[in-house]
């Protein structure tokens, strides 16, 4: 009888041990850390820097000066006709007289020239700090929008400025680091890896339908609301005047926005022809960036999303998607524009 009980005990013990073996510690999430080689930081400094920037960008820079305000904002510089010239992320610093502006590296020289043109008699210094700091991005495609700043252990060797992307939580966390930063981060509760062909910042943006830089947002070719600046927290309709403000406000209040940037999925490598067409041959938009069968295109909203059109680019099928970060219920005026 004792033997039977012992055997029963052994069987129960075996089951418990097997169940115990199935319990593993929760795996740490994997984040990608990528140096943004195509972006550059510009320092704008001076006692009148706030009114200077307020008169040039679409967003309200004064939010950065509030004690409880954000550490960065997304904004655009427009020409007098209200079309986009440059996209930027504006970062606050410890000095209220100094801001850092992130811009496209290829357009950096023209961007600085544009800023200096509007200085007039203001004491404003505009210079590149490319030899001091460079931007990085840290993101996780599975844990979109998770705040990771508190998980990064501060290393006294590096002075890092950490800020969530002001456009979309999905786009990760911006890190401004010294130029000699080697990309090694000490982090709690996560694993940090370098980018790969399947997991990188460009592909992340394309899947969200977010254009960036002079190639994807060609200067003078689109309006800020077509580039989703209103949905990406990049425009203020309550601040004072700025270059291009009149037409931007008029488009916003009329609600007539017929084209927007959207993510597209390609079925074949894209050739020289980047015009998106219907099967019947009508032009519906243009692709401005693509990689690994994903891209970003400026497309006609009504025909593409509500008309159930079969889309073709360079002779091959492609599919446009409505970004999940777009408002689910658009204002009635804009809804009316879709049916014009």
Image: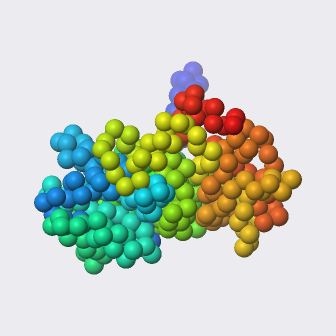
Residue 2 vs residue 157: left or right?
Answer: right
Q: Position of residue 146 (x, y in %)?
A: 41, 44
Picture residue at 55% right of the left edge, 24% below the top:
5
Along the viewing direction, whichever of 313 and 85 lies nearer the viewer:
85
Q: Position of residue 287 (x, y in %)?
A: 66, 61
Res. 57 image quadrant: bottom left
Along the viewing direction, whichever of 94 and 281 lies nearer the viewer:
281
Protein image colouring: rainbow
Residue 150 in view in this figure = no
Q: Position of residue 153 (x, y in %)?
A: 26, 56
Residue 225 in view in this figure = yes
Q: Position of residue 144 (x, y in %)?
A: 48, 45
Residue 148 vs residue 258: left or right?
Answer: left
Compared to residue 109, the image places residue 191 above or below, namely above
Question: Which corner quadrant holds the C terminus?
Answer: top right
Residue 209 vs residue 234: left or right?
Answer: right
Picture residue at 46% right of the left edge, 48% below the top:
247
Q: How many marks?
A: 0
Res. 154 image quadrant: bottom left
Along the viewing direction, whichever of 238 and 329 lies nearer the viewer:
238
Picture residue at 49% right of the left edge, 61% below the top:
212
Res. 1 image quadrant: top right
Picture residue at 55% right of the left edge, 57% below the top:
222
């Amino acid at each position: 009888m004792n033997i039977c009980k012992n055997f029963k005990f052994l069987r129960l013990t075996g089951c418990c041990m097997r169940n115990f073996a199935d319990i593993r510690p929760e795996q740490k999430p994997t984040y990608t850390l990528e140096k943004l080689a195509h972006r550059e930081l510009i320092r704008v400094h001076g006692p009148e820097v706030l009114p200077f920037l307020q008169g040039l960008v679409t967003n309200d820079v004064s939010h950065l000066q509030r004690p409880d305000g954000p550490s960065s904002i997304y904004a655009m510089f427009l020409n007098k006709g209200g079309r986009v010239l440059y996209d930027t992320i504006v970062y606050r610093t410890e000095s209220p007289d100094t801001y850092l502006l992130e811009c496209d590296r290829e357009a950096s020289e023209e961007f600085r020239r544009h800023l200096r043109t509007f200085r007039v008699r203001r004491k404003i210094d505009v210079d590149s700090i490319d030899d001091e700091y460079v931007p990085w991005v840290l993101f996780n495609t599975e844990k979109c929008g998770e705040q990771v700043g508190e998980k990064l252990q501060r290393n006294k060797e590096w002075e890092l400025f950490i800020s969530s992307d002001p456009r979309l939580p999905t786009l990760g966390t911006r890190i401004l680091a010294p130029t000699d930063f080697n990309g090694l981060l000490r982090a709690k509760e996560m694993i940090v890896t370098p980018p790969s062909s399947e997991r990188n910042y460009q592909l992340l943006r394309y899947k969200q339908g977010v254009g960036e830089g002079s190639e994807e947002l060609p200067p003078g070719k689109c309006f800020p609301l077509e580039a989703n600046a209103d949905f990406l927290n990049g425009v203020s309709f309550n601040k004072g005047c700025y270059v291009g403000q009149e037409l931007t406000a008029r488009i916003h209040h009329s609600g007539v926005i017929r084209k927007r940037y959207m993510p597209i999925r390609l079925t074949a490598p894209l050739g020289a022809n980047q015009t998106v067409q219907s099967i019947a041959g009508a032009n519906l938009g243009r692709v401005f960036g693509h990689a690994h069968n994903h891209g970003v295109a400026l497309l006609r909203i009504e025909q593409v999303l509500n008309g159930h059109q079969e889309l073709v680019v360079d002779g091959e099928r492609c599919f446009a998607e409505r970004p999940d970060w777009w408002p689910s219920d658009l204002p009635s005026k804009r809804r009316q524009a879709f049916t014009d």
